[in-house]
Amino acid sequence: MESPAGQARVYLHAAERPRAGLVLGHGAGGGVEAPDLVAVREVALAEGVSVGLVEQPYRVAGRRSPAAAGQLDAAWLAVVSRLRARELHGLPLLVGGRSLGARVACRTAGRTDAVAVVCLAFPLQPPRRSGSAPRPSRLAELDGVAVPTLVVQGTRDQFGIPPAYRQRTVVEVPGDHSLRRDLRAVGAAVQPWLADLLGRLG
């Protein structure tokens, strides 16, 4: 799929009778096959939500280092717009992702007209390097989201744990930033929140 930042790729998993669509982005160094993304995909499909997993152009091109934030956001917006017009047309849209993908979804939530955001392992504050000053927090990206938001965070995440706030629900699960330790807990964190949201959407 073409985007302003190059060729992106979407892996679409369609629910039988979709009630909504969920578009998820990957982390900086991993792909759409990350275990926590797969766990959420399965929960969403069971709730009747079609899922699109978006591979950013830098990964499609075989590069390891993420593109600049502006390029990531532009590619994401182009992909979401295309999905809204075609495969997910007419469905309420949820966006999200893990780590870097969660940041992109939060920054662009208003422009995608998303009804909710799902963040897996939001990278709140980069770990401090030895001898260096603390690096800035990304909490403003989360605080800027104006729709219901779920954050699933490992209890030992080296990036820290965001606070609950207004429409933001934070669920801690065993493990670190990878969220690999207890995938059942990741699914169990998402399922009731998603079911409640879908119930409110009608």
Image (tube, grey):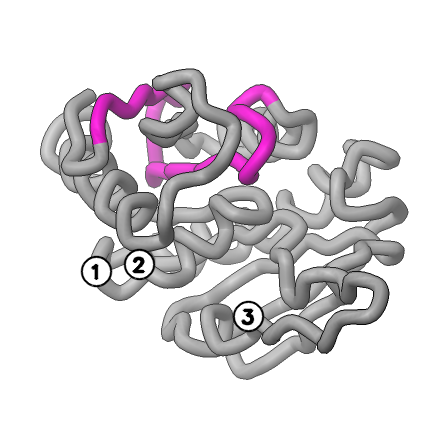
Disc number placed over residue 138 in the picture, else none: 3
Which residue is identified by label 1?
A: 111
Q: Earlier in the sequence, mark 2 or mark 3?
A: 2
- Position of residue 162 measured from the top left corner of the image (x, y, whole percent): 68, 71
Count residues near mark 2 (Cα–Cα under 10 Å), then give few for <14, some for 14-19, many for 20+.
some
Quadrant for the N terminus in the image: top left
Task: Look at discs 2 and 3 and give the one toward the viewer.
Answer: 3
**Residue sticking out furthest to the bottom:** 166
**Is residue 87 shown left or right of residue 25?**
left
Q: CA distance from mark 2 to mark 3?
A: 14 Å
Q: Name which residue type carries label 2.
A: Thr
Residue 161 visible somewhere in the drawing: yes
Please, is residue 96 above or below residue 55 in the view? below
**Residue drawn at 62 percent across, 68 percent down:** 169
Write the residue at 46% across / 66% down.
148
Q: Position of residue 68 (x, y in %)?
A: 36, 49
Along the viewing direction, whichever of 70 and 105 lies nearer the viewer = 70
What residue is drawn where x is 17% and y is 32%? 3
Number of on-image labels = 3
Query: How far apart, in angstroms, are the residues tagged by discs 3 and 1?
Result: 19 Å
Q: Is residue 195 above or below residue 139?
A: above
Residue kind at label 1, given as amino acid type: Arg
Q: Is residue 174 magenta?
A: no
Q: Nearer the viewer, mark 3 or mark 1?
A: 3
Mark 1 and mark 2 residues within 8 Å of each other at the beta carbon: yes
Secondary structure of the residue carrying numbered label 1: helix
- State the extent of the magenta-drawn residues as a range: 6-33
- Residue 164 rendering spot, x and y as whole percentages: 65, 76
Please tell me whether residue 34 is drawn above or below residue 129 in the rendered image.
above
Identify which residue is drawn at 32% across, 60% down: 109
- Residue under numbered circle 2: 108
